[in-house]
Image: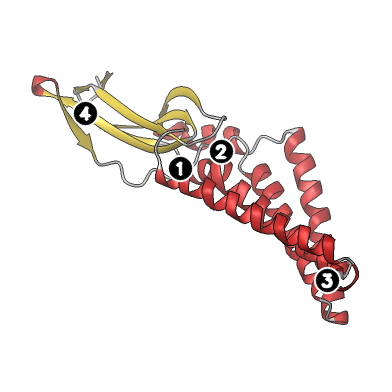
Amino acid sequence: TLQNGSNITRSYFYYPGKLYQKLILYKVIEGNKLSETNIGDIYSGFIPIEIPAGVTNEYIIKMTFFKNNYNEIDSKLINQDHLQIFTSELYQSLTDKKIIGIILSGMLLMMILVALLNYFITKKIEFLHNSLYSLCMLLIIFLSTYLTFNPSWFKGLFISYLDLLLLVLGTLFYLAFTRHFLDTRELHPRLNNFLKFEAWLVCILMILYSVFYFGFDTY
């Protein structure tokens, strides 16, 4: 229940915590009925609430978590004037994890550039596969670092699905790199068949995970 005792309209932002796939705001009206309030696309993780002057409103919020182990409820009501300060403290705090992530991202970027340079010079496909593998690892580390403490919708999707997808793609590129670099087709046919089987198995498992993730609401 929120009350505005002033003579002007007050604007707030409700921060429910993280990580939510869907947020729906209902206002309780006469007869204890619920009226859904249009709050737009809540990709930032904050729900805008406006209360007219001299009005008391009661709200109910329906929240749907993403399918991951990092969900938490941390209910806060933030004045519009303080939102920028709150988000700055939430996103921009420099932790040891962020520092290490930034350093590793820079190292992986250098590896990508070196691998691409070798590919353009030698025209050997294994260097392209190696650079794509490093790119997937770079995206995992950089996005994990950049999205630390971020309650946005994209953070939830990344943690619950996209990071695994990037890991699987990186594994496939690394298997392809290994096969071409060792020339397993000619020199190690049994190892080549094993690596091909492993690649197909990883693809099938990722497809099954995607079906369960997008096709079912249960976690």
Quadrant, the N terminus: top left
Distance CA(mark 3)–CA(mark 2):
46 Å
Q: Quadrant of residue 64?
A: top left
Classify mark 4: helix, strand or loop.
strand
Distance CA(mark 1)–CA(mark 4):
21 Å
Residue 69 shows in this picture: yes
The residue at the point 52 percent across, 32 percent down is 86
Name the one closer to the observer, 92 or 105.
Answer: 105
Instruction: Decide if residue 74 is on the left or right side of residue 168.
Output: left
In this view, which residue lies farthest toward the left?
31
Name the one closer to the observer, 57 or 40.
Answer: 40
Classify mark 2: helix, strand or loop.
loop
Q: Amino acid at mark 3?
A: Arg
Which residue is identified by label 3?
185
Distance CA(mark 3)–CA(mark 4):
65 Å
Which residue is identified by label 4?
27
Which residue is identified by label 2?
150
Q: Amino acid at mark 2?
A: Asn
Distance CA(mark 1)–CA(mark 3):
49 Å
Q: Amino acid at mark 4?
A: Lys
Tell me if label 3 and label 2 are in contact, CB under 8 Å. Answer: no
Q: Position of residue 121 (x, y in %)?
A: 87, 81
Q: Position of residue 177 (x, y in %)?
A: 80, 65
Residue 178 shows in this picture: no
